[in-house]
Image (cartoon, grey):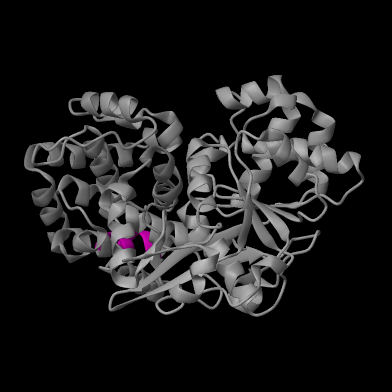
């Protein structure tokens, strides 16, 4: 029978999993984190757990909070196991379990006063975020802050009752300035190009709607370092909980399964202080831009390439897509011919070798990552992961046939059925709009490209429009398999 994960059972669990070797009672909080889902616990929380195991920086433990019901649910589950998390790190031929203990408290999302009090606590030197790519209130086509979003309008109208993470950060910074305290550093851990700059734009943009002078103070005073984060971390379900119980004998209400690979590249801009994460593998650099562009275009762009082709072919797992010759061939051809040539040089990195590593990671059968997860939220992901590469290639007069086909596959997927006729359940915050637009695009492909918030100027580019229209017509006429076969033969 599996052992319930709690502090008191750690000695028993140590027989099958690595457990914290430090005294959690001796930890104190230095980080308030918004968004305590799987990626945070597989990435930032794991790095800090490693650091605490060296005996260093025990004053940088995490307090977890959030602004969503999902955050509240996870906090409740973790509370029942003393805020411990079982992390299962998987390579193709092996799996290792560890228990992390770097989170020492949570604050319920609806306890606004407690969140603000913690933001004003001088011990909190970093406020970090994993609120998803779509949580930054930006225009997808321009990457500019969107002041018209209903949640932003509500916060701007009533800052004293702000509910967004950025409204809370602003309120916390006001309390710190009033108390003459050093501002905390705001550190995004989301998978966004220039995530620090995007976060600054959201915070400053929201503040400017009600208090322009304070917005200027934030812009001049508060640090928002950019960072590149990477670790493939699927969603947790009954499958993962059962695997943990069967293979490691641990009963965890919400374990996290992930690959064994991880990477974190950060700009070293932490005026209030930071943990010495470089001692556990974090790379601090003056400019993270080359690293994040490499990752977002090659890895995240690669995910998009296999996602919709795999989805239309009724493939369930990502590693199964990598075993399919058409999907794997599609990925390799687009990456080597269209994506890699427009990825700028990265310090001390061979981008071709990086892509080979990506292929290996995608093919890992232990991860259990799903095609459906990769297809999720294309309306936010396409403008960040695919469309900038198309724009660069068009600007340089380079072919975009493969990337146009990827865009057509996304459109065809959003119609809502696979090639076999199976219904695709809603898989995007804008699913209803996307399915309606995809239905119109079946006869008028340019209806899809007219989504300015997605495609911006490239939706008007004649070369892209022609390639997209041909690809979409082929998908509807001949199906995904035949269309990919012809593309690979060229």
Instruction: Give the total number of marks visible in the rendering.
Output: 0
Q: Which residue is drawn at the image coordinates 59% and 52% (left, top)?
A: 194
Q: Position of residue 224 (x, y in %)?
A: 70, 52
Q: Position of residue 292 (x, y in %)?
A: 53, 60
Quarter of the figure that contains the C terminus: bottom left
Q: In the rendered view, would you say 147 is above or below 7?
A: above
Q: Residue furthest top?
A: 157
Q: Position of residue 175 (x, y in %)?
A: 83, 39
Q: Could you tell me if residue 65 is visible in this image?
A: yes
Q: Is residue 202 magenta?
A: no
- Residue 277 lies in what quarter of the image? bottom right
- Residue 355 lies in what quarter of the image? bottom left
Q: Residue furthest right?
A: 180
Left or right of residue 484, residue 170 in this image: right
**In the depicted view, which residue is nearer to us: 8 or 405?**
8
Q: Is residue 335 magenta?
A: yes
Q: Which residue is drawn at the image coordinates 34% and 32% (left, top)?
A: 449
Left or right of residue 160, residue 413 in this image: left
Left or right of residue 132, residue 53 in this image: right
Q: In the rendered view, would you say 96 is above or below 438?
A: below
Q: In the rendered view, would you say 351 is above or below 179?
A: below
Magenta stretch? 333-340
- Residue 12 lies in what quarter of the image? bottom left
Q: Which residue is drawn at the image coordinates 53% and 40% (left, top)?
A: 72
**In the depicted view, which residue is nearer to us: 407 or 137?**
137
Q: Could you tell me if residue 18 is visible in this image?
A: no
Q: Which residue is drawn at the image coordinates 30% and 37% (left, top)?
A: 465
Quarter of the figure that contains the N terminus: bottom left
Report the predominant secondary structure element of the magenta stretch.
helix
Q: Position of residue 269 (x, y in %)?
A: 74, 61
């Amino acid at each position: 029978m599996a052992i319930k994960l709690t502090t008191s059972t750690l000695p028993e669990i140590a027989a099958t999993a690595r457990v914290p070797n430090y005294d959690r009672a001796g930890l104190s909080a230095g980080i308030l984190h918004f968004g305590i889902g799987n990626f945070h616990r597989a990435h930032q929380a794991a790095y800090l757990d490693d650091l605490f195991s060296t005996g260093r920086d025990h004053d940088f433990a995490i307090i977890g909070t959030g602004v969503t019901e999902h955050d509240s649910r996870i906090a409740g589950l973790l509370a029942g196991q003393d805020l411990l998390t079982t992390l299962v790190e998987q390579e193709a031929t092996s799996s290792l379990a560890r228990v992390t203990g770097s989170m020492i408290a949570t604050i319920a999302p609806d306890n606004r006063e407690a969140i603000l009090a913690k933001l004003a606590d001088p011990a909190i030197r970093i406020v970090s975020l994993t609120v998803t790519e779509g949580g930054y209130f930006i225009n997808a086509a321009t990457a500019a802050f969107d002041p018209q979003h209903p949640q932003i309008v509500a916060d701007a109208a009533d800052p004293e009752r702000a509910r967004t993470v950025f409204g809370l950060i602003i309120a916390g910074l006001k309390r710190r300035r009033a108390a003459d305290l050093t501002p905390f550093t705001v550190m995004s851990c989301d998978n966004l190009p220039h995530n620090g700059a995007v976060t600054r734009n959201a915070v400053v943009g929201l503040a400017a709607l009600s208090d322009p002078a304070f917005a200027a103070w934030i812009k001049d005073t508060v640090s928002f370092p950019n960072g590149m984060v990477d670790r493939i971390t699927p969603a947790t379900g009954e499958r993962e909980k059962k695997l943990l119980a069967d293979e490691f004998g641990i009963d965890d209400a919400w374990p996290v399964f992930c690959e064994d690979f991880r990477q974190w590249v950060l700009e070293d801009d932490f005026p209030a202080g930071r943990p010495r994460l470089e001692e556990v593998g974090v790379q601090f650099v003056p400019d993270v831009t080359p690293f994040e562009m490499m990752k977002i275009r090659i890895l995240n762009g690669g995910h998009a390439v296999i996602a919709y082709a795999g989805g239309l072919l009724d493939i369930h797992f990502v590693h199964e897509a990598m075993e399919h010759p058409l999907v794997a061939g599609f990925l390799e051809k687009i990456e080597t011919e269209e994506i890699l040539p427009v990825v700028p040089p990265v310090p001390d990195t061979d981008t071709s070798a990086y892509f080979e590593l990506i292929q290996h990671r995608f093919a890992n059968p232990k991860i259990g990552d799903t095609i459906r997860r990769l297809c999720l939220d294309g309306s936010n992901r396409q403008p960040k992961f695919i469309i900038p590469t198309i724009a660069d290639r068009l600007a340089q007069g380079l072919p975009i046939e493969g990337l146009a086909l990827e865009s057509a596959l996304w459109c065809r997927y959003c119609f809502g059925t696979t090639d076999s006729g199976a219904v695709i359940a809603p898989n995007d915050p804008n699913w209803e709009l996307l399915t309606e637009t995809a239905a119109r695009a079946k006869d008028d492909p340019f209806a899809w490209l007219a989504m300015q918030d997605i495609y911006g100027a490239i939706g008007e580019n004649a070369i892209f429009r022609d390639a997209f229209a041909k690809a979409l017509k082929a998908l509807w006429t001949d199906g995904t398999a035949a269309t990919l076969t012809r593309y690979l033969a060229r």
